[in-house]
Amino acid sequence: MAVLSYNEILPKKVIDYNNEPYEVLSSHIFRMQMRKPVNQTKLRHLVSGKVIEISFHQNESVKEADVETMQAVYLYTNRGESWFAEDGNPKNRFSFPDDTVADKTKWLVANAPVEVLLYEEKPVTIKTAIKADIKVVDAPPAVKGDTAQGGTKQVTLESGAILNVPLFINEGDILRVNTDTGEYVERMEKAK
């Protein structure tokens, strides 16, 4: 594990802060008047997802977390737990409480590939692709003259997520969704 000085704590790095793994979301180094420089950061706890703001001073350093990755597949979500299996080794199954990964699993269908972050050889969280292609399973018909609300409607996706989309989207279409923002990007394939 590398030791990072205050100015090396940059976005996308994973650090050990109070013996817990945190991902650096943002950092801003600045100097106020005659004081020494400070790195103001936003950190997200890898397990709970809680975001905190911490300022690191010039004389402070922090250890880079020993985080490894493993390829896995999403199996299902049941009774408040989301289950995954190691890719190529289906006997190695593990779960996360659904409330910690629900924002990511709502865009996943069975057997979708995910990347699992391991901290001290234990799975702590998952990373999904930024964009996912998902099939529409339920779409209400577009009613002529129904554009007063900006021309959108709600559809249900194969993963169970509900999404606002343009009126021309139909059942059976395959949509590209931004999994970070939860927004419709484009229609990839029209229903046959």
Image (cartoon, rainbow, N blue to C red):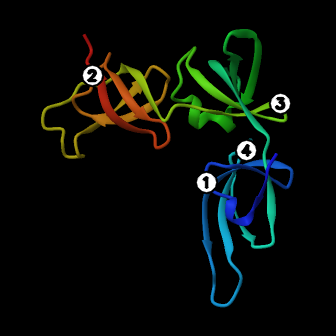
Q: If you read the primary sequence from the N terminus, does the residue marked by circle 4 or circle 2 appear first? A: 4
Of tags 2 and 1, the one toward the viewer is: 1
Q: Find residue 145 and report its horizontal and vertical position in percent.
A: 13, 38
Image quarter in which the N terminus is found: top right
Splitting the image into 4 quarters, where does residue 172 fall? top left
Q: Which residue is mark 1?
A: 11
Of tags 3 and 2, the one toward the viewer is: 3
Residue at 82%, 30% in the rendered image: 122
Horizontal arrangement in the rendering, residue 118 relative to residue 129 (left or right):
right
Q: Amino acid at mark 4?
A: Ser
Q: Amino acid at mark 1?
A: Pro
Residue at 62%, 48% in the rendered image: 12
Q: If you read the primary sequence from the N terminus, does the residue marked by circle 2 or circle 1 appear first? A: 1
Of tags 4 and 2, the one toward the viewer is: 4
Residue 170 numbered tag: 2
Q: Which residue is mark 4?
A: 48
Image quarter in which the C terminus is found: top left
Q: CA distance from mark 2 to mark 1?
A: 39 Å
Q: CA distance from mark 3 to mark 1?
A: 23 Å
